[in-house]
Amino acid sequence: MISDKAMETVHIKTINQHHALLDIQKPKHPLFSILRFEEMPEVVIQEKTRLISDYYQIAFKKNCPNKIQYGQTAYDFDGGVISYFAPRQVSIVDPGFLFPKSGWVLNIHPDFFIGYSLLTKISSYGFFEYETNEALILSDDEEKVIEHILHQIWTEYHLPIDQFSQDVVLSNLELLLTYSNRYYNRQFIVRKPANDSLLSKFEKLLNTYFDEGNSIKGLPTVHFFADALNLSNKYFSDLLKQHTGLSAQQHIHEKLIEKAKEKLSTTNLSVSEIAYELGFEYPQSFSKLFKSKTNQSPLEFRASFN
């Protein structure tokens, strides 16, 4: 096993540096470039590497020799798959990693958005916080749509820069992100059997957390359950929201209130004792959450049973 200390870290600060590392010509624009995997030199990853870049990156991959994993299930894919990376997001590349045989990689520095609404809107797209193994697998029809938009951006990138260049690129990028959002929501739906299994596992983990006294470690967190299910926090919460209407944090709060009601109605424990048993550091925090969810204080709820 390779420790974090032994792992090489490559921090790419500019798109120009990205091109230099690949030993290809400088980008036509310092804040934006689009590359074809078919035209990129072969890259051999010899050791486990931590990659960090200071710009957005969208990679559309076809004929990829690797597998993609959702939760605890791995899937082979020969068709299109698209991954999204936010600035300073950490990615781990294992030795022997192979780049796809075809596709596109779009690099966009945050400064390219200055003066445009997309500067703030892009942060609303949750998939930029997903892990690499939660990439979007495209259907044949979706693949055609994404390729068409990327080809439009590719064409614009190779035209002489004028006063409309940035508008055209960002309009196409916004369209790409809108379709990506639609396709991710579709993916949550069509992967319902696998997702139902994940939701069932989450419910069991949530019950076990309280029933086995794990609450002495503190309040359960979204990260605790997402990590147990091999999902990123954001993907896990979005999946729950799509299927249940509640985020992961809301599910945890619902379970806390359920357990609190059970203890208030069936035991003589004080409010403070119940708060500590549920993992709250301060009883006041417990009382505040309970009232916000039930419109009653814990003592008022207990009194209703007497």
Image (tube, grey):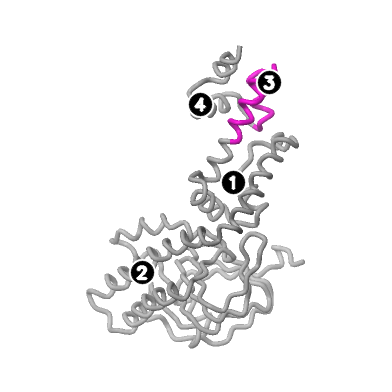
Query: Closer to us: mark 3 or mark 2?
Result: 3
Amino acid type, label 3: Thr
Q: Position of residue 245 (x, y in %)?
A: 48, 45
Which residue position is annotated with label 3?
A: 266
Q: What range of the chain is rendered magenta?
A: 255-279
Which residue position is annotated with label 1?
A: 222
Callout 1: few (<14), some (14-19), or many (20+) C-alpha neighbours within 10 Å? some
Task: Depth check: give the residue in front, 263 or 122.
Answer: 263
Query: Closer to us: mark 2 or mark 4?
Result: 4
Q: Looking at the picture, does residue 121 appear above or below residue 97?
A: above
Which quadrant is the N terminus positioned in? bottom right
Tell me the SS state at disc 2: helix
Cα distance between the residues tagged 4 and 1? 22 Å
Which residue position is annotated with label 4?
A: 294
Tell me the SS state at disc 4: helix
Residue displayed at 33% across by 82% down: 155
Residue displayed at 54% across by 49% down: 240
- Name the N-terminal-most of marks 3 and 1: 1
Residue displayed at 52% across by 69% down: 137
Cα distance between the residues tagged 3 and 4? 18 Å
In reply to whether residue 258 is colored magenta, the answer given is yes
Tell me the SS state at disc 3: helix
Query: Closer to us: mark 4 or mark 1?
Result: 4
